[in-house]
Amino acid sequence: MISSNNPTNKSQTPCPSNKENVEEPGDKRRRIGLGKMVIPPKHVANSRSKNTLSSVPIQSNRAGAGDSSAGSETGSVCGTTSGMEFKSREDVDNLLNEKMMGKTKMDLKGTAEQNKQKMEYIKKLRACVKMFQKREDDHLLEKEGFLQTVQSLEERIVEIDILAKNKQDELITELEQFKEKHSTLQEICTKEEADKLAAVESYRKEIELKIVAEKSRDTLSESFAKAQQENISLQEILKRNQEYNSSLQQYNSKLQSEATANSEMHSKLQNENNVLKEQVIMFRSKSDILQEQLSSARTSLQDAVKEKEEMKSNLDCNRSELNQIRDERNSQIVQIQHLTADVAMYKNELNTSCIALENVTKRIAEIEVTCSMQKEQMKLLQKELDSANAKLKMADSTNIETRMEYKHQQKLVEDLQISLADAESRILDGDKLRKKLHNTILELKGNIRVFCRVRPMLNDQEHNGSEANHVSYPAATEFLGRGIDLMHKEKKHSFTFDKVFDHEASQESVFVEISQLVQSALDGYKVCIFAYGQTGSGKTYTMMGRPEEPEMKGLIPRSVEQIFEVSQTLLSQGWKYKMQALMLEIYNETVRDLLTSKSNSRDLGKQLDSIRNGNPSDLTVVDVRSIGEVSYLLTQAAQSRSVGKTQMNEQSSRSHFVFILRLYGVNEGTDQQVQGVLNLIDLAGSERLDKSGATGERLKETQHINKSLLSLSEVISSIAKKDDHIPFRNSKLTYLLEPCLGGESKTMMVVNISPEESSSGESKCSLQFASKVNSCEIGVARRQTQMRH
Ligand SMILES: Nc1ncnc2c1ncn2[C@@H]1O[C@H](COP(=O)(O)OP(=O)(O)OP(=O)(O)O)[C@@H](O)[C@H]1O
């Protein structure tokens, strides 16, 4: 009985009692004839026919019912065998075993009962044989059907084979195509992979180059700063040396004047000495005379003493004579009195001689005192002379030392001057290298540089207790000075720019970062710096500042100062510059000249082409020769500019302010010519209409400002997407900025941010716009240089 596609299994687990599972061979044929895909394989068909007995349960009643001829032939048998069933091989075996249990057919001596049983048995056997014949017929029919089926199946198989072959061929060709495609794709893949690797490599190299360039820029800036420091300290040393030198010269001349005074004094003293010597000689001669007088007085005194002695002896003689003559005394008394008078006279003479002697002695003593005094004086003078000589000698030696020191200092000054010149040339070289590196970095980056500056809280805001907690700066080295984090609606937004200045950054520190860019204008580049941001965020402060206060000066006055100062120093290298200033504003989509009186000011919108090309006929172009002239023009322009009060800013710029400084440089030595342009732009502030509370004229202004800033953002988006068409002509502002944004110039944007939390939405928009600007590749700026004919 075939009830499934697995007859083998059926033979193992037949299910004869389950009639619902029984399937007629005819059914099978019908099933196969319907062409269903249940096709028994050949060997299954064979095994089925072979195992019919063993595997197919036998239903003799069905065989009997289905075969009328058998029924007629074995009618009695059927009658007696009704209900006889050969369900399985066991039934047949049982039948055969029944025979085995009884006597043999040949045993004819059995009872009638036995005969009846035999007849019954024979009937059964006949029924069994008939059933087998029937089954054989059925099987033959079935076999025929099977054969037909097999044939049709074989045909079908052949068809299917052909189809399969065709399909296989198709598949093979497809496979080959796929293989080809696969190999080409693999080639592309490997190429792509190689390109990717090359790109990654070149990107890595670029990053390395960038790092190297940044490092060398840093080291150069350091060495430049150092060189500047050295320069300053050398200049200080030089100044001090010069001061020291001049003080030495003063000291030297003082010493020389002292020396001449000393030599004058010396000669004077020598004169005095000579005079004194003459006096001494005179005194000596006088003394000699006095000595002679003294000796003659002494001899006369001796003579007088001798005379006195003689007289005494004479007196003695006379006394003896007196004694002798006492007698004769009376006669000789007169003689004695005469003699006494003579003695008295001699005594008087002696006294006068003594007095004269005393006088002479006194005079000698006086002369001796004077002489000794003069000797003392002479000694003193000699001492003074000696000390003066010693001083002179010392002054001479100090003079020599000073001269030597002077020479040494001169040598030092010369050395310092040489090293100063060396340092200056190194600074110049460093400057050149830095310029080159700066240009290389810009060329490598090829994009607009963007700085971000956060305004400090204004006084009244601080008093209101407003805090700028929502703005912070990442401390990671990678983002230090370049990153800014903004909290808006409890979400953190991080941005990175070329430089970020916090609220404490000074005007000077901002300018230092752009000074190289300003310098490029002198080198012949077009330079454009513009400030962008929400109204009241500090654009005008950044660009103009307060020019009257040195610390508060903004980028425009500082740039002008640098341009003029550097152009002066470049004179020594043969460069002569001519400069022209232009100032205009774009107000409500009209272009106005700010250097003409307000009454003369009219819309120059149609002249934007000529303004861009550098030959405007109606715009005032002023030749400027000094910082003062430009400052005057800036003040004039500031007065003409459209400014108004808004809810966000006391003094809000209601227009885009454009300051253009054209520079024409000629080098007399090399005949080289350069043409640079410095565009400094203070954009009007973006403003949310609901927040600004503007109405009437203010509303119109705000709408124009927002529209032109929107055009700017559309232009930036197009550049960032590298669109074929950039909508520069959508507004006057973008049309004017086209040369700056189109790759011809070195461009930098300062995005200004208000620190108040209430402005975080606008700050986010500004920072997002700035990021987009930062990612714009605008190409490489070209230097405008040529040779003079
Ligand atoms: N860095 C700063 N330090 C000190 N004060 C500042 C700074 N930046 C801006 N301010 C002050 O903030 C106020 C607004 O600044 P400013 O007028 O420059 O803004 P703005 O962006 O030009 O505005 P608007 O677009 O309306 O013209 C001014 O009073 C200015 O002096």
Image (tube, grey):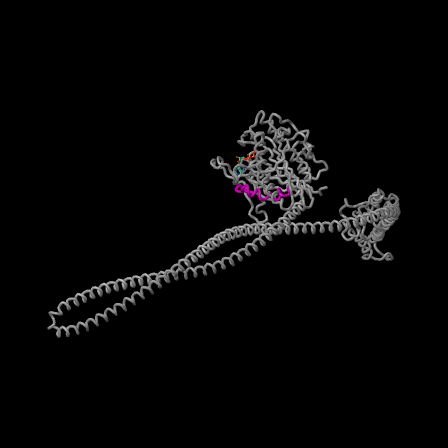
When the figure is inspected, residue 698 is found, relative to residue 418, above or below; the finding is above
Tell me if 439 is positioned left or right of 43 in this view.
Answer: left
Dominant SS in magenta: helix
Q: Nearer the viewer, residue 592 or 688?
A: 592
- Is residue 199 left or right of 646 when viewed as pictured? right
Q: Nearer the viewer, residue 52 or 424?
A: 424
Which x, y percent locates residue 498? 61, 44
**Image location (x, y in percent) of residue 361:** 27, 64
Q: Nearer the viewer, residue 733 or 467?
A: 733
Tally of marks: 0
Q: Position of residue 55 (x, y in %)?
A: 80, 52
Where 705 sits versus 222, above or below?
above
Classify residue 188 as left or right of residue 619: right
Residue 538 can be seen in this image: no
The verdict on residue 645 being magenta is no
Which quadrant does the C terminus fall into?
A: top right
> Residue 214, image x and y in percent?
62, 50
Quarter of the image where ligand 1 sits: top right
Looking at the rendering, the stretch of residues picked out in magenta corresponds to: 501-522
The image shows residue 76, relative to residue 362, as above or below, that is above
Q: Is residue 410 visible?
A: yes
User: Within the magenta stretch, is there residue 511?
Assistant: yes
Looking at the image, which residue sits at the far front? Answer: 331
